[in-house]
Image (cartoon, rainbow, N blue to C red):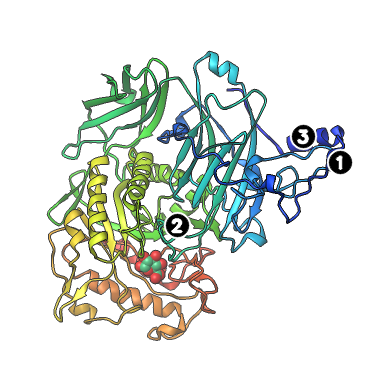
Amino acid sequence: MAIRADSVGSHLRRLAVALLACAPLLANAQGYAPRPQDRVSEAQNPAPVAASASTPLTNLPGRERRSLNGKWQALVDGYADGIGEWKAVWKDRTATGKTQFFEYGFDDSVTLDVPGDFNTQRPELNWLEGSVWYRKTFEYDAAAARRKGRRLFVHFGAANYRADVFLNGEKLGSHEGGFTPFQFELTGRVKPGENRLLVHVNNERRKDGIPAKGFDWFNYGGLTRDVDLVETPGTYIQDYSLQLAPDSLRRVDGWVQLAGTAPRQTVRVRIPELGVEVRAEAGADGRAPLRFEAPFALWSPTQPKLYRVEVSTPEESLQEDIGFRSIAVRGDALLLNGEPLFLRGVNFHEEIDGRRAHSEADAQRLLEQAKQLGANFVRLAHYPHNEHLLRLADRMGLLLWQEIPVYQGIDFAAAGMQAKLDAMLAEMIGRDRNRAAVIVWGIANETSPGPARNAALSALAQQARRLDPSRLISAAFYGPGFDGGTLTVSDPLVAALDVVGINEYFGWYTPWPVEPEQAVWKPFGKPLLITEFGAEARYGHHGADDVASAWNEEFQAEFYRKQLRMLARIPFLRGAAPWVMMDFRSPVRMHPFQSGYNRKGLLSERRERKLAWQVIHDYYAEVGR
Ligand code: GCU
């Protein structure tokens, strides 16, 4: 594929050309008194061209693609007014001659690394909640592609929180949501020679956002994940589902989805190691349902077996490593491949070394820590993590709970909220539906019952089940009620779920309602996971184990010993996940002992083990026996 992403050198070349031109043009320095003709209304800033937005391609590693990762030109637009006002940053103008100068131009701007949050790349951006404009140029042989009927897409792993994308001054569209992939088609819009891709990213928190304005993690903004150009044939394999049917350990009930002008094609799926080769015909809608059986070595944490799968049409062939396993609920039992399962879990955010994690190396370091703890399960808090981590979890044999950031104060009654919830859920499930490691789709965290919330989340649970009948649907709730005798879980949303997550902080946020040894939980007929429990301690701080305000490691360790005495008494408990594996940055944790970090980690942010780490490690060694 004849694509060449720009280097810093190419914009220096452009600058040299501009200087040589030296056309004595009227000074066009952008003062602060915008000239009327410079004012660009939103109307002039073209509305998104719906045709260019398309369902994100899956299995990027298996496709014909060119990474646009690396250094991008960047303009900081701190008050977020560069998109429609007189600055008209999206016009991406280049100064020519000695007298022209664009204060808001890219030619001599700073650069930022993509992928990566912008907050931690430049000290002046640390607390920015505003807009950054990114620009990358690339060359592409559009004529050759056209002759071969090839199509070109730009695919973003994520951009937090809103993104507006332009190509050569033309707006392609926008995306809302900071943790799921999106893409736009460039076919017919790329030109010979240099093309200019512009992305406006704004990370301001929004009342009608998902998450809304309040959350307990750092609001890293920017192009936080990989960006790729992807080339496909005229009709291409958009995505596919190849997972075991919910009631079988041998049968795959799947489908392949084609997109393009000639959808009626024969699709072939091969798994050479098992001698599987099946064909199916895609209909006018491009969908090719398929069903086959095979003697799979089932994927599990102890045997994370992946098979090389090939999905092909007459025009293209994709390969991917996929694991096959069954996850199910029977009464209040959790079954993996038909066997009882206990989830030795831990939570962590997508953060390492004080920045947004994004690479395979980052994923390796995070998942290794979970393995060292003795975990077989990770709850990816509180949003979909980068795809590198999920593919690595497949290989390492770690089970995952993945959720969309429907976190606490969501405005469920806001106009368009259900559509936003559905879109974000579909983007998460669409990307990861073939990752054996994912066993739970989480649809909410600590939302309070109410008519709008109950309706929205019950509908979302149904949407999740429709999109993926092979996995469990859950949500994490605030702590249980206490009726003076027993601890009770009573939320109307429970009825819509397969598994219930409870976040309880007895001994930290709330006093123990009873002594742990006397605690009795009332069964509710479904598996229970304690999805969060934890207390804060500052690494290296030691002293009494019964004084909460001392931030001692001893207090945190004793907190967990007491908690485990209660968990041992819950017959329908099927898993536990301490909150949290590692201290993480949060602007709402500014106590002097926290200094901008939530200190409930079993590890410090430098991955130093606190005393509580050993308590959980020993517990998992015991239950995992
Ligand atoms: C909540 C919430 C977490 C938060 C934690 C805490 O349960 O889900 O996101 O960090 O409590 O207060 O530390």
Please give the residue where the numbered disc 2 appears in the rendered image: 369
In this view, 125 is above or below 144: below
Q: Secondary structure at mark 3?
A: helix
Q: Residue at x 83, y 41 (%)?
A: 26
Question: Nearer the N terminus, badge 3 or badge 1?
Answer: 3
Q: Amino acid at mark 3?
A: Arg
Please give the residue where the numbered disc 1 appears in the rendered image: 98
Q: Amino acid at mark 2?
A: Gln
Q: Is mark 3 within 8 Å of ligand 1?
A: no
In this view, 236 is above or below 11: above
Q: Secondary structure at mark 2?
A: helix
Asked if residue 229 lies left or right of residue 31, the reply is left
Of 142 and 398, nearer the camera is 142
Please give the residue where the numbered disc 3 appears in the rendered image: 14
- For ligand 1, the image quadrant comes to bottom left
Asked if residue 489 lies left or right of residue 544, the reply is left
Of 262 and 618, nearer the camera is 262
Q: Residue at x 81, y 32 (%)?
A: 17
